[in-house]
Image (cartoon, rainbow, N blue to C red):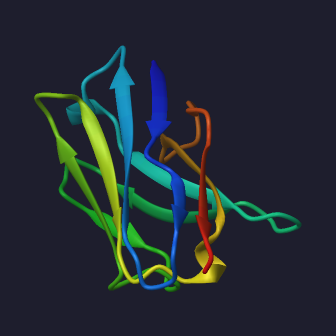
Amino acid sequence: VQLQASGGGLVQPGGSLRLSCSVSGLSLEMLPIAWFRQAPGKEREGVSCTSFMDGSTAYAGSVKGRFTISRDLAKNTVYLQMNSLKPEDTAVYYCATCTMDYWGQGTQVTVSS
């Protein structure tokens, strides 16, 4: 199983970004996928986890209402739509399986004016 994250960049506070996680080796229907992030000097934290097997989705309190996780089964890709971004959202974002067995490389998100 391989995961590849993309879509990071520099955005102003209040702006939006959409991250993509392309998955190969197994269908999304079989894999609960999560987004994690790690800011400089801070521990890694879970942002969102979704299971397409049972339709469940969970978000960290700090992003609830601003971030949305979604999928495209035809492309075997998971997205993280990030709206109303704040400077404290600045971090390297990683996609992984919710059980953290498989990880993609990170993509940098910087929120700054």
Q: Quadrant of residue 103?
A: top right
Residue 53 visible in this rendered orientation of the protein: no
Q: Is residue 25 above or below residue 40?
A: above
Q: Where does the image place residue 107, in percent across and percent down from the top left?
A: 58, 45
Q: Where does the image place residue 110, in percent across and percent down from the top left?
A: 62, 64
Q: Is residue 113 above or below residue 58?
A: below
Residue at the image position 45 percent from the left and 18 percent from the top: 1
Q: Is residue 33 left or right of residue 62?
A: left
Q: Is residue 38 above or below residue 6?
A: below
- Count of numbered badges drawn on the protein: 0
Residue at the image position 56 percent from the left and 32 percent from the top: 104
Residue 28 or residue 3, whichever sits in front: 3
Residue at the image position 45 percent from the left and 51 percent from the top: 34
Residue at the image position 47 percent from the left and 79 percent from the top: 85
Residue 20 visible in this rendered orientation of the protein: yes
Q: Quadrant of residue 77?
A: top left
Q: Where does the image place residue 74, in percent across and percent down from the top left?
A: 10, 28
Q: The C terminus appears in which quarter of the rendering?
A: bottom right
Residue 83 or residue 76, whichever sits in front: 83
Q: Is residue 7 above or below residue 102?
A: below
Q: Where does the image place residue 33, in percent across and percent down from the top left?
A: 39, 45
Q: Residue furthest right?
A: 41
